[in-house]
Structure formats: C-alpha cells, structure tokens
Amino acid sequence: MFTKTKVAALGAAAVLALSACSSDDGGSSEEASAGDFAEGSTMAELSDAGSITIGTKFDQPLFGLVGPDGAPVGFDVNIGTIIAEELGISADNINWVETVSANREPFIEGGQVDLVVATYTINDERKEKVSFAGPYYNAGQSLMVLADNTDIAGPDDLSGKNVCSVEGSTPAANIADNYPEANLVLFGAYTDCLEPLRNGQVDVVTTDNVILAGYVDDSDGEFAIAGEPFTEEPYGIGLAREDDEFRDWINDVLEEIFEDGRWLDAWNADGSAGTVLPEPEVPTVDRYENS
Ligand code: GLU
C-alpha cells in the first residue's frame, strides 16, 4: 500500500513527482496523468486509478522471481514497471499477480489482470483469445539436463526419455506434437521439474533457453543446457484481445524504450537477465492485424 507515511518518508523528490503527476498541463511534465490519454481509453482509466495489475512468473530467475520481500524481480518485471510508469503509476502501485503458463489467457480474458508480462510467446492460437504487444525479446526452446548427462544433445534424442515441462506452455505442445516418442511429464510451473531432474525421475527439462539459463545459473554446476535452441519464442505483452488502442500504445512505448536505452537498462538491472545472458538484439515490434 502507498500510505501517507510512505509519501512523507520519500521526501521532496516524491512530492515533486506527485505534483507533476497531478498537473493538468497536457504532457509538458515528465510524469504521465490521465489527461494525457484519450478519454475512456484503458490508459486513461489505469492512469486515473493510479494502479495496475500485472501477471508475471514468480519462479523464473532473471525474468520474474519473487525475492524475500515478496516483490518479483527480473526483466519481465522491469518491462511491466516501465509500462506502468508511462501511465504515471509508480512501482509501489503495481499489483503483481502470479501467472503460471496455463492461466495467462484465462486471467486476461477474465479481467483478473490488466497485462501479462511472463515469458509469454506470441502465437496464432493465443491470438484467438488475447492480444499481444511486442515482441520485446526473442527466446527459443531448449533442453536442460544433469551436467554429467552425455546422451541428450537435442530434441531428436528424446525418444523414450522422461521430459519435464509445464501445462499450457509452447515447449510442452511442441514436444507433444513433434516428438511423440518422448514421455512428457507435465507440472504447473518449471520449478516443479527441478527436483525430479535432480533425483532422476525425469531426464530432461524443456522450456525457453533463457528460463533454463536462470536455473543452470542457480544450480552450482548441477544442471547444464543441452544443445542449441530449436524454436522461436517471441515474448509479447498479453492484454485483452479487443483493446487495439492499448496495444498500439504499448507498442509505441516499446519502440521508444528500444530507442532511448531503457529497454537495455531493464535487461542489465540487478537480478535481471543481463546479469547472466548476453546482450540481445533489439526486436522488431509486430503490429499484426487481429483476424
Ligand atoms: N515462452 C513459452 C510459453 O509462453 C514457454 C515459457 C512459459 O511457459 O512461460 O509458453
């Protein structure tokens, strides 16, 4: 909660920011306010409410991981925070909700969240239910094994292997559709696969390379990536399907932050992807038409 005591404690800088926030000067100040956006738009509504609910992962290091203080950190969290800030909503007023892979579309469709920023691949099936701004990053499906495993180097080696992934994810669908000889074991979140990998109940964990990189980094040499990425997983920001105005605006924000360095700063921030992964190429926003 953003209490009065907290405002007082933040001191002069915050007071300046708050007064800029409530000014009605049509955008000459740095802080956005509801008056900056078309009346009735989702941007105006959120800005006016002063808070936003964003779905993200809570168990994926580098992208969305809840720390001891209960607040998630990572690249997805940083991207969501920038979108909120562009609406004039401070980080304190973001309500972070855990979205696992399978509940992202239902949470958007049911209005439990305003946005989802959660290693969320843009694809045609999902576009039937939700809209995507972005991409803001391009990942690819990969494999993670115990570091001493030498018999898995790519998806063609999965025949007869126990392959762990997550319900409602594109990597699980890819294995089910294209590698039917693999024995797919599905859980609700990727961290559910880690203990089974350690104790040999599964041979391999599959999801996006950058999610696996976070687990490898945390594993003290116990886990390793096997082979190269074998799909394209462009990460989008999920929102209500019919809200083209909001989608266009988020795409504008993304193009702006690709340009002005904030996207790269978000990548390189503490606890974020750039602490482990190489600097990515700037993606190209895809302003696709909804069919
Ligand atoms: N990017 C993939 C997906 O959206 C895998 C990662 C995840 O499950 O969040 O399904």
Image (cartoon, grey):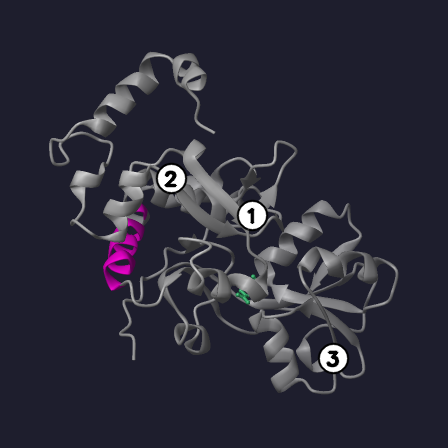
- In the rendered image, is residue 87 in sight? no
- Residue 82's label in the rendered image is none
Q: Which residues are magenta?
A: 244-257
Q: Earlier in the sequence, mark 1 or mark 2?
A: 2
Identify the amino acid type marked 3: Asp
Whether disc 3's CB lies below 8 Å from ligand 1 is answered no
Instruction: Say which of 227 and 199 sits in front.
Output: 199
Q: Residue at x 28, y 24 (%)?
A: 18
Q: Secondary structure at mark 3?
A: helix
Q: Residues within 10 Å of mark 3 (few under 14, many from 20)?
A: few
Identify the amino acid type marked 2: Ser
Relative placement, left or right, of 154 versus 96 is right
The image position of residue 147, as x and y in percent, is 79, 58
- In the rendered image, is residue 228 in sight? yes
Q: Is residue 204 magenta?
A: no
Q: Earlier in the sequence, mark 2 or mark 3?
A: 2
Give the quarter of the image for residue 146.
Answer: bottom right
Q: Residues within 10 Å of mark 1 (few under 14, many from 20)?
A: many
